[in-house]
Image (spheres, rainbow, N blue to C red):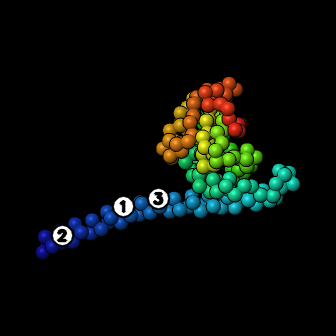
Amino acid sequence: MASRCDRVDCRMRSVHRLLLVLACGLPLAADAQDFEAERRALVREIRNDVAQTSFYIGRSKLDERVMQALATVPRHRFVPDHLQRYAYDNRPLPIGHGQTISQPFIVALMTDLLEPAADDVVLEIGTGSGYQAAVLAGLVKEVYSIEIVAPLGESARARLAALGYDNVQTRIGDGYYGWAEHAPYDAIIV
C-alpha cells in the first residue's frame, strides 16, 4: 500500500509542478495581450488629442500610415523594465542619463510633419532609446540615427537589432556634425 501512495504522491507533485509552471507562464501571456491592448488605446488617445488640438497643430488628423506605425511599435521595449507599466501612457518617460523617451503624441505629430515617404532616407539627431527610429523604420527606406550619449546609443543599437529594425543604422557621435557618408537626406528629425 505504501508504494501506491508513493505513486499517488509522485503524481500529485508532478501535477503541482505543472500547475506552478502554468501559473507562472500565464501572466507573461496576459502581459503581452495587455501591451497590445494598451497600444491600441494609446493610438485612440492620440487620435482624440489630434482632433482636440487641430486648431493649434494645423491638421485634424494624422497620416494613417503614421498611426499604423505607432500601433505596431512595442514602446514598452524602449523604456526601462521598471517603467514598462507606464509605456503606453501618453507622456514622456525617463530612459536614463538625464534623457527621456518623447510623449507618443509628440512622436506622432513630428513624424506626420516629416511627411515620410517609402523611399525616403532620414537622419535622426538623438537616438535616445530608439523609439522614434523604430516608428520611422516602418515608413521610410533608411533611418540613420546619431546619439551623443554612448550608453544610450549602444543600448538602442542592440534593441533595434534585436527587434528586427534592419533599416535603422545608429552611431555614437554629435548630431551637430551630421552623418555625411549617407547624405543627402530627404528629411532630418531632431
In this view, 44 is above or below 179? below
- Closer-to-camera residue (53/29): 53
Badge 2 density bin: few <14, some 14–19, many ≥20, Cα 10 Å: few
The alpha-carbon separation of the residues under discs 2 and 1 comes to 21 Å
Which comes before the other along the chain, label 3 or label 1?
Answer: 1
- Between disc 2 and disc 3, the foreground one is 3
Which comes before the other along the chain, label 2 or label 1?
Answer: 2
The alpha-carbon separation of the residues under discs 3 and 1 comes to 11 Å
- Closer-to-camera residue (21/113): 113
Give me the disc on residue 151. Answer: none
The alpha-carbon separation of the residues under discs 2 and 3 comes to 32 Å
The quadrant of the image that shows the N terminus is: bottom left
Residue at point 47%, 58% (across, down): 28
- Between disc 2 and disc 1, the foreground one is 1
Q: In the picture, residue 119 is in which quadrant?
A: top right
Residue underneath mark 3:
28
Residue underneath mark 1:
21
User: Element at badge 1?
Assistant: helix
In the picture, measured across the screen, residue 164 lies left or right of residue 11, that is: right
Q: Amino acid at mark 3?
A: Leu
Residue at point 58%, 28% (across, down): 172
- Residue 51 in view in this figure: yes
Residue at point 50%, 62% (across, down): 30
- Residue 101 in view in this figure: no
Badge 1 density bin: few <14, some 14–19, many ≥20, Cα 10 Å: few
Q: Amino acid at mark 1?
A: Val
Q: In the rendered structure, are the residues bearing label 2 and label 1 in contact, judged by CB atoms less than 8 Å apart?
A: no
Q: In the picture, residue 72 is in which quadrant?
A: bottom right
Residue underneath mark 2:
7
